Image: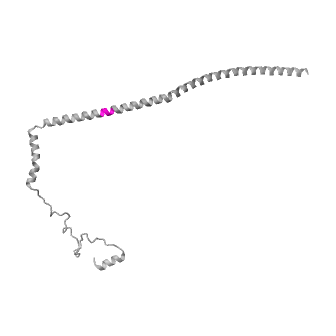
């Protein structure tokens, strides 16, 4: 970009579209960065080969293990590992079973404590409620009996009153006829 274009850009308040350090297609710009000129990772200080003796030393323990393994057909090792695995699984199951048993006992104890607490608190309340219900039934029967007695008395009083009214009416009629 020429100086004139840069001044015009500054006056207009716009920024350049392309940053100066980015590679450019502009062949005229000699300051353009070419990625091929600067490699991303330097490899000059790194050794790309290890010595043959180092590799040989690293292979020796592996070769010994391979020879030991080849000497044995592997079934003994597999059986030993299988037996160890079975023992580990059985130990895990025993441990889980013990944990479950302890949890079950703790829950049973908790339920027993709650039951005893419930019986202690609500047993007496329930007993008192039953006593109150019996007393209420007795009172209901008593009040029913009293009500029946009062109805009989009232019925008798009504009959007596009707008889007296009839007698008074008859006397009144007789008195009016005489007059």
Q: Looking at the image, which residue is at 70% across and 20% down?
A: 152
Query: Percent from the top left, x then y, of residue 19?
Result: 28, 70
Q: Vertical placement of 24 versus 43: above or below?
A: below
Left or right, residue 9 beside residue 145: left
User: Of helix, strand and loop, which mostly describes the magenta segment?
Assistant: helix
In terms of image quadrants, where is residue 34? Answer: bottom left
Q: Vertical placement of 154 versus 41: above or below?
A: above
Query: Percent from the top left, x then y, of residue 67?
Result: 8, 42
Query: Percent from the top left, x then y, of residue 25?
Result: 23, 71
Left or right, residue 113 beside residue 21: right
Residue 43 forms part of the magenta stretch: no
Image quadrant where one finds the N terminus: bottom left
Q: Which range of residues does the magenta coloring cover?
A: 96-100
Q: Vertical placement of 69 versus 33: above or below?
A: above
Residue 99 forms part of the magenta stretch: yes
Q: Looking at the image, which residue is at 53% across and 25% down?
A: 127
Left or right, residue 82 beside residue 56: right
Q: Looking at the image, which residue is at 28% across and 32% down?
A: 94
Outermost residue, right side: 179
């Amino acid at each position: 970009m020429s100086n004139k274009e840069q001044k015009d850009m500054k006056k207009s308040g716009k920024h350049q579209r392309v940053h100066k350090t980015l590679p450019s297609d502009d062949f005229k710009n000699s300051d353009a960065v070419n990625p091929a000129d600067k490699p991303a990772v330097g490899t000059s200080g790194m050794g790309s080969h290890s010595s043959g003796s180092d590799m040989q030393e690293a292979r020796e323990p592996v070769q010994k293990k391979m020879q030991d393994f080849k000497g044995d057909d592997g079934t003994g090792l597999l059986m030993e590992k299988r037996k160890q695995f079975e023992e580990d699984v059985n130990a895990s199951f025993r441990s889980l079973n013990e944990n479950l048993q302890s949890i079950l006992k703790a829950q049973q104890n908790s339920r027993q404590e709650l039951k005893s607490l419930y019986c202690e608190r609500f047993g007496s309340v329930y007993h008192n409620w039953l006593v109150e219900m019996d007393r209420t039934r007795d009172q209901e029967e008593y009040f029913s009996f009293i009500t029946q007695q009062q109805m009989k008395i009232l019925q008798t009083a009504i009959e007596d009153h009707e008889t007296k009214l009839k007698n008074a009416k008859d006397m009144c009629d007789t008195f009016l006829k005489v007059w």
